[in-house]
Image (spheres, rainbow, N blue to C red):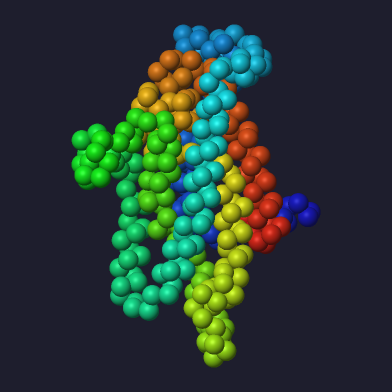
Amino acid sequence: MDRKKRARSILNATLAERTYMLMLLPGLIFLIIFSYVPMGGIIMAFQKYNPVAGIFGSKWIGLQNFRYIIKIPEIGQIFMNTLIIACSNIALGLVIPIIYALLLNEVKNGLFKKTIQTIVYLPFFLSWVVLGVIFKQLLSMNGMVNNMLGFIAGEPIRFLSSNALFRPVLIATNQWKGFGWGTIIYLAAITSIDTGLYESAMLDGATRLQRIFYITLPGISATIVLMATLSLGNVLNAGFDQVFNLYNPLVYDTGDIIDTYVYRLGLIKLQYSLSTTIGLLKSFISFFLITLSYRLANKYANYRIF
């Protein structure tokens, strides 16, 4: 009887919320079609995939593909490139928005503050397809940046074809695009701080820097911890869209990441099994990191989804 009552209560609750359920239906269908149905292709990681025979007709080889990718000479460099670029983006993606939010919070002119905030987060909405073309034009050998630097350096700088400069270019452009959007979270956290604390500190003679260090930063520390722990899940996500639209064969040594390598291996070289294997390995590691990040977020920031 308990099961019947529970089932009946669930059915009644579902019927009562049927309007909201119907609103969720398109997103649920989209998720199933593009996220869950393609997961059937994971089986290719354990096969010597033959496009003619298909998934059900290809030869099963077990873990042979996993043993093979470990021996690929460039695989270590690709993982290292991904870690360096992703970790740099994560670190700067935390520090820069915090600093910018603190500076913007000190602006007293409301109109100027809103104008600047709008200007800096607009790039977030631009596609890397568009920005890739813009940055290629700006940073090319005959681009505007090199024309301006020509008066100082004398010779043009190979921003997009130098292994020494390509990573800094990726990291800098990624921060320029996204730091304004990340600032919104910290500005929202700052607004939740009791203004009476600032008034009391001013009466006690605290300087502006002291108010920032002893009131503002401690007040948003929980948000900082939460964003830092949740960002662990992106350690292996170095930004396929950005790298794909900016890199070239000259900078594969420092700019080639897991996602771009999987793209070339699978769609250009037609090595479907190997590309699926590398993608699956990345997914396993990312799943572990995401699980770890949510456990840390729950422990240190009291953040839970369920």
**294 or 133: nearer the viewer:** 133
Residue at (63%, 33%) from the top-left corner? 284
**Percent x, y of residue 167:** 43, 37
Please say if 27 is above or below 193.
above
**Percent x, y of residue 247:** 37, 31
- The residue sitting at the right extreme is 1
**Percent x, y of residue 46:** 62, 17
- Quarter-of-image position of residue 120: bottom left
- Quarter-of-image position of residue 9: bottom right
User: Quick one: quadrant of the C terminus?
Assistant: bottom right
**123 or 248: nearer the viewer:** 248
Residue at (46%, 59%) from the top-left corner? 97
Please say if 167 is above or below 210.
above
- The residue sitting at the bottom extreme is 203
Q: Is residue 225 left or right of residue 25?
A: right
**13 or 196: nearer the viewer:** 196
**Percent x, y of residue 270:** 44, 15
Is residue 14 visible to the viewer in this orientation of the structure? no
- Quarter-of-image position of residue 40: top right
Counting every numbered tag in the picture gives 0
Is residue 218 visible to the viewer in this orientation of the structure? yes
Q: Is residue 145 left or right of residue 89?
A: left
Residue at (45%, 66%) from the top-left corner? 101
**82 or 189: nearer the viewer:** 82
Please say if 73 is above or below 123.
above
Residue at (42%, 34%) from the top-left corner? 164
User: Quick one: quadrant of the N terminus?
Assistant: bottom right
